[in-house]
Image: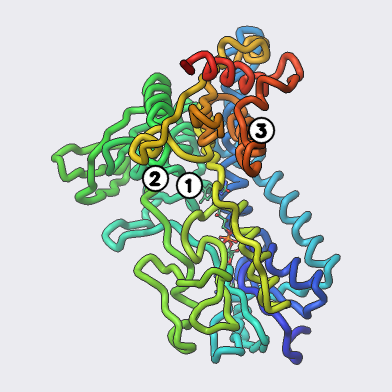
Amino acid sequence: MPWDKEYDVAVIGSGPAGEGASMLAAKEDASTVVIERHHLVGGGCTHWGTIPSKTLRHAVSEVLKLRSNPLFAKMINHAATSLPALLQNMSGVVGKQVMLRRDFYQRNHVPVVHGQASFVDPHTLSVDTGGSQRSLRAKKIIVATGSRPYRPSDVDFTHPRVRDSDTVLALDETPQTITIYGAGVIGCEYASIFRQLGVKVNLINSRDKLLSFLDDEIIDALSYHLRDQGVLLRHNEEYERVEPLDEGVVLHLKSGKKIKSDVLLWAQGRTGNTAELGLERIGLSADSRGLIKIDEVYRTAQPHIYAVGDVVGPPSLASASYDQGRFAATHAVTGENNERLVQDIPTGIYTSPEISSIGRTERELTSEHVPYEVGHALFRSLARAQITGQGVGMLKLLFHRDTLQILGVHCFGDQAAEIIHIGQAIMSQKGEANTLRYFVNTTFNYPTMAEAYRVAALNGLNRLC
Ligand SMILES: Cc1cc2nc3c(=O)[nH]c(=O)nc-3n(C[C@H](O)[C@H](O)[C@H](O)COP(=O)(O)OP(=O)(O)OC[C@H]3O[C@@H](n4cnc5c(N)ncnc54)[C@H](O)[C@@H]3O)c2cc1C
């Protein structure tokens, strides 16, 4: 057992951040241990976040395709396409992910201790394994404890009709109506999923538009398509109280509106998992959202203790968390690391339609007085989209009108999260290699969605005078 020795590195949490950190440390020959309080590895990412939501979304959109195909619609077995059945399918994918990740730890000889970790002193962790308390010592400690849905104290989350993004995955029947409070990425994604399942959706936004960090044209498209699908969108609303009942739940809004539905999904932000870490015992603290402050190499105020992933705040993405874990572990083991997260991290939003974007928006470029031009490609004019029947969507390139440097890529529609990476590859080139001309001077496979880049580049060049 791992208790008797002092490790070079102890990592708390086995999500993407903890996995990235522990694999890097082990490959650098540092003796490494991982402490994970859930009985399976993978983190919130695998069990309650990215993997379940994206698997469910895929299953729901497959069902929708069948339903809208006259050849297959009559053959659909409704029990097999209910929410519980689709969630069952999701557990298969989660199981495969867990096996894969468990294997990484085994192959790299990294013991995983299952229990709740907290600090005893700056080098000692107490681990509650559910019955016994043991302690572990390490020279360096990496906190990768992730985050959980934010739960205000005046909302009763023990009531079966009140859910958050963790507990919504345990619904035992498909609701007829759902109210989603919070129209951030998670709220919008679940609004799409439930609507595609045929559920009546109220999406309540406390701001004046959806996902305001996106380009306005993409925000407009998302709002249009959600409404077109039947999602009832309400902006600038704040909750006054939540009234759970036996036969439903009522959301009382400060504006005086009352919205009754079968289920309420609370999707109003997240909190870092720091409350149980005993940070006060080692002279560290977290802010009001449970986040730990770090420096540019992920060190906390205790220089041998690092923090990575959701527990340090934005970008709060699985992809970035993994890299942060690797960077912190490199510094912990070798004493230096010059790698940083790329400046432009792409956004992938798995709504219907899918959205992805990288770089600056028109709003930002205008306020910075950058002389830019726009090139558009509508998916409905691409052969590949016509063949697959996925004509809803658009690729939009923003480029400097003098240098032709690409400044932003914004996309919505089928496979947007994949398509964006072509633009990212060119946009991240240094100097003159970042140019719109690449897309007109290269040859694309035909028919492909990638061809949208050529169409958008030509469209943009034609606008130049
Ligand atoms: C619904 C939803 C959808 C998402 N979709 C996407 C997406 O499409 N793409 C994307 O990039 N990101 C997505 N995310 C975000 C992504 O899941 C997180 O950014 C990512 O999981 C963060 O990784 P992490 O390692 O920091 O934390 P986590 O994955 O949360 O892992 C933290 C681990 O630490 C453990 N832990 C916590 N405290 C302790 C303790 N005291 N002792 C021992 N163990 C502890 C937890 O049990 C957990 O296993 C989504 C999130 C949600 C909620």
Residue 265 marker: 2
Residue 150 x/y as whole percent: 39, 58
Q: Secondary structure at mark 1?
A: helix
Residue 113 x/y as whole percent: 70, 75
Q: Secondary structure at mark 3?
A: helix
* Ligand 1: quadrant of the figure: bottom right
| For residue 458, above or below residue 341 | above
219 vs 101, nearest the viewer: 219
Residue 168 marker: 1
Q: Residue at x 66, y 8 (%)?
A: 71
Decide which of tag 3 and tag 1 comes sooner along the chain: 1
Decide which of tag 3 and tag 2 comes sooner along the chain: 2
Badges 2 and 1: C-beta atoms under 8 Å apart? yes
**Amino acid on which disc 3 is placed:** Ile
Residue bearing mark 3? 422
Query: Farthest top residue?
Result: 70
Ligand 1 under 8 Å from disc 2 Cβ: no
Q: Which image quadrant for residue 108? A: bottom right
**Amino acid on which disc 2 is placed:** Leu
| For residue 331, above or below residue 399 | below
Q: Is residue 55 visible?
A: no
Badges 3 and 2: C-beta atoms under 8 Å apart? no
Residue 292 marker: none
Structural crowding at the residue carrying mark 3, measured as other residues with C-alpha within 10 Å and reported as few (<14), some (14–19) or many (≥20): few
Labels 3, 2: front one: 3
187 vs 306, nearest the viewer: 306
| For residue 366, above or below residue 333 | above
